[in-house]
Amino acid sequence: MERVSPIEAARIAKVHIKTLYRWILRGKVRAWRNAKEQFEVCVVSLRARLELRPVRPLPVPSSRRDARAADRRAGRKLAALGF
């Protein structure tokens, strides 16, 4: 059974390290403490958690006004990136 550090597991899962620690403490991901009292995360358990994680749909604007505001925000973000 392959084990990785919490930082590496967070990178694999593409989540914040605090989210990973919450999963460990709630029992959603298996982890053990090593001799230095640091967590080691089970990769198999992590992959199983990722398969069960629901994908959130994008929010749909409820009105034309909201849609225009969302378009303006997206335009500003793109302009800031140089597009």
Image: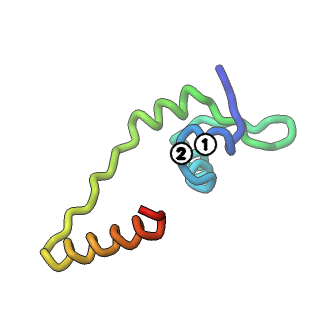
- In the picture, the quarter occupied by the N terminus is top right
Kind of residue at disc 2 = Lys
Front-most of residues 48 and 59: 59
**Farthest front residue in view:** 83
Name the residue at 15% across, 71% down.
62
Q: CA distance from mark 1 to mark 2?
A: 5 Å
Q: Which residue is mark 2?
A: 14
What SS does tag 2 mark? loop
Q: Residues within 10 Å of mark 2 (few under 14, many from 20)?
A: few
The residue beneath circle 1 is 11
Q: Position of residue 14 (x, y in %)?
A: 53, 45
Asked if 37 appears above or below 3 in the picture, the reply is: below
User: Is residue 63 shown left or right of residue 15?
Assistant: left
| Contact between labelled residues 2 and 1, with CB atoms less than 8 Å apart | yes
Q: Position of residue 60 (x, y in %)?
A: 20, 63
| Image coloring type | rainbow
In the image: residue 12, left or right of residue 5: left
**Residue at image point 68% right, 28% down:** 3
Q: Quadrant of the C terminus?
A: bottom left
Q: Given the current orientation, which residue lies at the most extreme bottom position?
A: 65
Where is 14 relative to 48, above or below? below
**Mark 1 residue crowding within 10 angstroms, few (<14) / some (14–19) / many (20+):** few
Residue found 47% across the figure and 30% down from its top: 48
Q: Amino acid at mark 1?
A: Arg
User: Which residue corresponds to the image point at 26% horizontal and 70% vertical from the top-left?
Assistant: 71
Q: Is residue 47 above or below residue 39?
A: above
Q: Secondary structure at mark 1?
A: helix
Q: Quadrant of residue 42?
A: top right
Residue projecting furthest to the left? 64
Give residue 29's quadrant in the image.
top right
